[in-house]
Image (cartoon, rainbow, N blue to C red):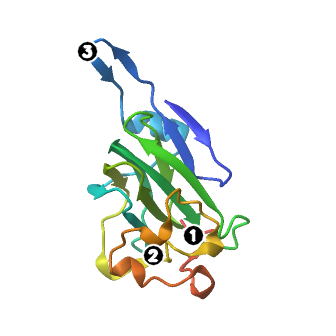
Amino acid sequence: MEVIKTDIEGVYIIEPRVFGDARGYFFESYSKRDFEERIGAIDFVQDNESMSKKGVMRGLHFQRPPYAQSKLVRCVKGRVLDVAVDIRKGSPTYGKHVAVELSEDNHRQFFIPRGFAHGFVVLSDVAVFQYKCDNFYHPEADGGISILDDSLGIDWQIPVDSAILSEKDTKHPLFKDFESPFDLNDK
C-alpha cells in the first residue's frame, strides 16, 4: 500500500496495491501490520456501512471524548467526495480540511484521526461507503458542524442547495458558533 500524506498532519490517503487480470482484481483492503508500520497503532473495533443516493450529504460528524473515533473509510460502490475538517483547538490547521475522492475504481481509503469532523457527498447514482472505527458508537456523544457552512471553503462538487440531508444534519451549528471538545494534544 502507498500512504500519501496530506496537508494536515495525521490525515492520510491510502492507495492499495491492486492486482488485476482478465478475471477481475484483488487487493488487501486492510493489514493491521502494514497499517501500524506506516501510520500507527490503531485498534479498530467496529465496522459500518451505508448506502446513499446521488446528492446525499452526510456530516460533518464526530464523537465527543471520551468516545472520540478515528476512522478508516472507503467507497466500495460508486463515488464520493470525502472530507475531514480539523477541529482540534490549538492546531495550526484548525478549521482547515482535506478532501479526497473515493471510488470503487480508485480503491482509495482515507484515514481520519480523532479530533476531526467527517462528512461526504455522493457523486454517483448510488454509493456504498464502509468505515472502520477505533471506538464504539455512543449516541450521547454525537457532535457535528454544518456540512453546508460556506466558511469552511469546501467545494462539494454538487449544488448544495439541492443536497439531500438528514434532519439531524440540518441542525448542526456553523463553524463560527461551534465549541470544539478537542485540543491539539488530546489522544
Neighbour class for label 2 at 10 Å: few (<14), some, many (≥20)? Answer: some
- Judging depth in this view, the residue of 43 and 47 nearest the camera is 47
* Figure quadrant of residue 179: bottom right
Mark 1 lies on residue: 186
Give the residue furthest to the right: 92
User: Residue flagged by tag 2: what amino acid is it?
Assistant: Pro
Asked whether disc 1 touches disc 2, contact meaning CB atoms under 8 Å apart, the reply is: yes
* Figure quadrant of residue 149: bottom right
User: Residue flagged by tag 3: what amino acid is it?
Assistant: Arg
> Residue drawn 33% across and 81% down?
167
Mark 2 lies on residue: 65
Residue 23 is labelled as 3
Task: Tell me where residue 108 appears, x and y as whole percent.
Answer: 46, 39
SS type, badge 1: loop
Mark positioned earlier in the residue sequence (1 or 2): 2
Neighbour class for label 3 at 10 Å: few (<14), some, many (≥20)? Answer: few
- Judging depth in this view, the residue of 27 and 65 nearest the camera is 27
Asked whether, in this view, residue 92 is left or right of residue 3, the answer is right
Total marks shown come to 3
